[in-house]
Image (cartoon, grey):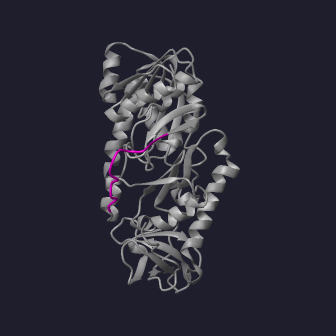
Amino acid sequence: MAEKIFSKAGGLPRVKLSHAPAGPNAFKRMIDIADRAEPGQMVAVYDKNNNPYGVAIYNPRSQITLRIFTRENPEEFQVDRFFDERVTRAVSLRRDVLKLQDKTNACRLVHDYADGLPGLTVDIYNDQISLEFYSLGMYRLWPNIEAAFKKHFPQASFQHRASSYTQEMEGFKIKPEEGPGRKTRVVENGVQFEIDMKAGYKTGFFCDQRENRLYASQFAAGKNVIDLCAYTGGFGIYAAKLGGAADVTCVELDPEASAMCKRNANINKVKVDPVCADAFTYMRQMIELKRKYGLVVLDPYKLVSNREERDKGIFKYRDFNRIALSLVEEGGIFVTCSCSGMVSMEEFSFILRGAAANAGRRVQILKKSGAGPDHPVAADYPEGEYLKCIFCRVF
């Protein structure tokens, strides 16, 4: 293991703000002086009057130049104490307040800004902990982070992840582990899933939809169900095992995820038809065959990742929903989701409204929800409320 990079904040490079940010992020235009600071370093932050403002992670090549993770006086800051306190608080929320261990052995342990650790998300799957990094600075601090978690999970193994986009934008490279991936099995609400810790998207599984999968399953009894962009079969397998669906089809373009969906169905002893295909193409084929479903779930990948893709992504969401609505039988249930943080619930509802009008369908909205409570949202960082899920009845 690499040596810990920082022991305390004494002698940290100083960054002076020209004006204070409204939230936890400061951008280049807000910075007056960055003395001796290098990309990925922790820095002591001061306001324009040279009063202590806090401690942050600095990266001038990132769109977010400063990620301010504490307003503590930099001269009193100690990094190991900081991580111990933040990790203990995060673990206590999941264990003592939410008591997630009663229903699952998979959850989010750290949700970025909301848990006071910007640039980091942490998920636990049984005895495996997956760290996903969004900033160079947090990646450099991984030994400190792991040390803090080992106090609560001494038997856990750790995996490191970061998207290729993040690594390029932030300027770091995660060395891939050699050999076959480590697999583990998790259970939530009595449904089991196998996870390959080296494969898949994000940290390997999507705990954020746990409550939404359970709620959707109550509409599945005796219905033909289609789970679009199914990944490893979350909504579809819930519908089969807990909901008593008559027939379940899971459509997923990624062949490895589709194969894992079949594996998960076998683990749960339910019958699911995993279809490895493009969802757009498959939906159009089903419309031509005049197929209808009593429960349609649409949970696509993030279609709006940045401002440059926004218009294109909004069009895709509208088109996706328009076609999916055409597959819902009269009086059937439609569950539509968006994981794009740059699309608000209000805007997503407007997209659904337009898609329904274009499809010639009348939609009753039954419920709007987001991620599970292990994905809290910081009041000063509303962008963290990324997941939208709308449950509808369609006529």
Residue 21 horizontal side relative to residue 291, left or right: right
Residue 175 magenta-drawn? yes
Reply above or below: 50 against 380: below
Considering depth in this image, is 346 or 218 the residue closer to the camera?
A: 218
In the rendered structure, the answer to whether residue 90 lies left or right of residue 22 reads right
Secondary structure, magenta segment, majority class = loop
Q: Residue at x 53, y 79 (%)?
A: 8
The quadrant in which the N terminus is found is bottom left
Regarding residue 358, the answer to whether it shows in the image is no
Q: Which residues are magenta?
A: 173-184
Residue 342 visible in the shown view: yes
Residue 42 x/y as whole percent: 46, 75
Residue 35 is inside the magenta segment: no
**In the rendering, at what x and y percent does residue 177 appear?**
35, 53
Frontmost residue, 75 versus 53: 75
Q: Position of residue 145 (x, y in %)?
A: 51, 64
